[in-house]
Image (spheres, rainbow, N blue to C red):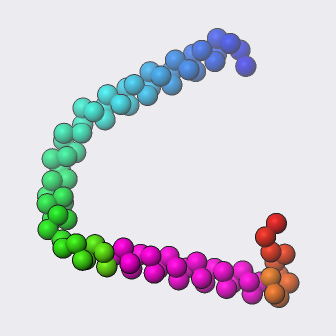
Amino acid sequence: MVKGAETVKTASIVAGGSAAVIGVAEKIGEATGMLSPLTSLLSDVPGWIWALLAVGVAVALWKTGAKVERTRLKAVRLGEDAGPA
């Protein structure tokens, strides 16, 4: 690649990144104001509900993983898949 093109690419990344950061910083107050009703609603939820939700997500992930493992094991046993490479 041409050295000048690399310099221009780097400079544009720096300028674009700076503009993005400034743009986000200018709008953060507005976004926080729009989210305040949601944050107050979520802060009223009891802790045991959050814990129950976390357990539910963990069980769902475990079940999905177990199903995938059974399916892959069955495919290997039937010769449809060679197994891990």
Please state, as top left, top right, bottom left or bottom right, where the N terminus lies in the image.
top right
Identify the residue at horizontal 39%, vertical 25% (top origin). Answer: 18
Nearer to the camera, 7 or 62: 62
| Magenta span main SS | helix
Residue drawn at 14 percent across, 60 percent down:
40
Tell me how many marks there are. 0
Pick whichever, 77 or 21, lies toward us. Answer: 77
Horizontal side of 52 relative to 31 (left or right) equals right
Question: Residue 35, percent across and down?
Answer: 19, 53
Pick the residue in front: 14 or 49.
Answer: 49
Residue reaching furthest to the top: 4
Where is 42 relative to 61, above or below?
Answer: above
Residue 66 located left or right of residue 32: right
Q: Is residue 9 above or below residue 56?
A: above
Task: Identify the residue at horizontal 72%, vertical 80% (top origin).
Answer: 72
Q: Position of residue 79 (x, y in %)?
A: 85, 84
Please tell me whether residue 16 belongs to the stretch shown in magenta: no
Residue 80 coordinates in the image, percent (x, y): 82, 81
The residue that appears at 63% across and 18% down in the rendered structure is 6
Quadrant of residue 20 within the rendered picture: top left
Look at the image and give the residue range highlighted in magenta: 53-75
Residue 69 at x, y percent in the picture: 66, 80
Kindly indicate the quadrant of the structure image that contains residue 43.
bottom left
Q: Toward which corner of the image does residue 19 lie, by quadrant?
A: top left
Residue 27 is left or right of residue 79, and the answer is left
Q: Quadrant of the C terminus?
A: bottom right
Q: Is residue 79 left or right of residue 55?
A: right
Q: Is residue 70 above or below residue 28?
A: below
